[in-house]
Image (cartoon, helix red, strand yellow):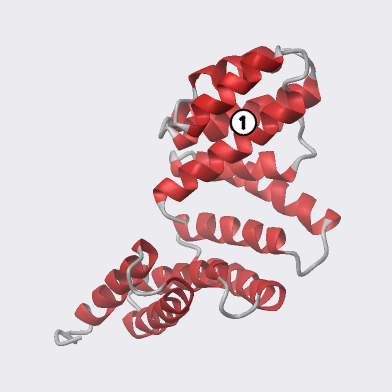
Amino acid sequence: LSAFQEFERKLILAAEALERIGGPVPADRLAQAKRSMASGNTQEAIKIFELVRTRGRQEGAEACFSLGELADANLDFASAYGHFREAAELNPDNATYLSQAGVMAHRMGRIGEATKYCDAALELRRHSLPRLHPEVAASLSNRAALYQEDSDFAKAEELYGSALAIQKQALGPYHLEVAVTINNLGDLFRVQGQHVKAEMFAREALAIRERALGADNSAVALSLNNLGGACFLQAKYSE
């Protein structure tokens, strides 16, 4: 997804959450919040979620999670992390809340906290979902990224490989999530100086993205950039 598409996705999810937990909020106020979000203005929705977050653990957790999604959409990562962390603490049995708290902690460089949340999310998903579920693959990838951050490249490769195997079986070999994991493997080899393998994975990710998205797409451009970098580091200047 492009940054704009991701922003739109988060707004849609927030609007759906308003429908579920907006209960005692007057209908006209809910309608106004949704209309405002449709034009990119999240302030009224934020006020409603702040009100709902005090109503109980379940609804409070969902409100906090939605606040985190809106803060993330608005690039306020510190606030997003605070909201995701609160959602996870209110409902520690929700793997999505734990996962988002972990991802955001990683983005902010809080590796210890990221590891705690990502491990908890992975454990929950492994016990509550089928072995080949895409969300299990997502948690494996999140944990692999943390191993890479810690320079445990062998463990990172193992978990990325496990995630990729699940995604190919669950989603098909040409799904865009498969391309993301292949791209991550390419980056893993790049940071280790294994440029031949980095090039191989960059080419594979590029082929999937071009097939799914066409040539004129930001994700395709990213894969082209990764491929160009891998070729440059092997002195393949003409490529």
Q: Is residue 46 visible?
A: yes
Instruction: Reply above or below: 65 against 187.
Output: above
Q: Quadrant of residue 49?
A: top right
Q: Which residue is rendered at x = 68% and y = 27% of the image?
A: 18
The residue to which callout 1 is attached is 66
Q: Position of residue 2 (x, y in %)?
A: 41, 54
How far from the left and from the top, in percent, is residue 138?
63, 59
Horizontally, residue 1 falls left or right of residue 222, namely right
Assign a secondary structure to mark 1: helix
Decide which of 213, 199 is in the foreground and name it: 213
The residue at the far left in this view is 237
Q: Residue at x 67, y 41 (%)?
A: 98
Q: Position of residue 236 (x, y in %)?
A: 19, 87
Say few, some or many: other residues with alpha carbon within 10 Å of mark 1 (under 14 / 14 to 19 / 20 or more): many
Quadrant containing the C terminus is: bottom left
Determine whether 127 is above or below 222 in the image.
above
Q: Quadrant of residue 226?
A: bottom left
Q: Is residue 24 above or below residue 175?
A: above
Residue 175, horizontal then vertical, whole percent: 57, 73
Q: Is residue 191 above or below residue 82?
A: below
Nearest the viewer among 70 and 129 is 70
Three-letter amino acid code at the position of disc 1: Ser
Residue at 46% x, 79% y is 211
In this rendering, the count of numbered labels is: 1
At x 58%, y 27%, the residue is: 34
* 12 sits to left or right of 106: right
In this rendering, does residue 113 appear at all?
no
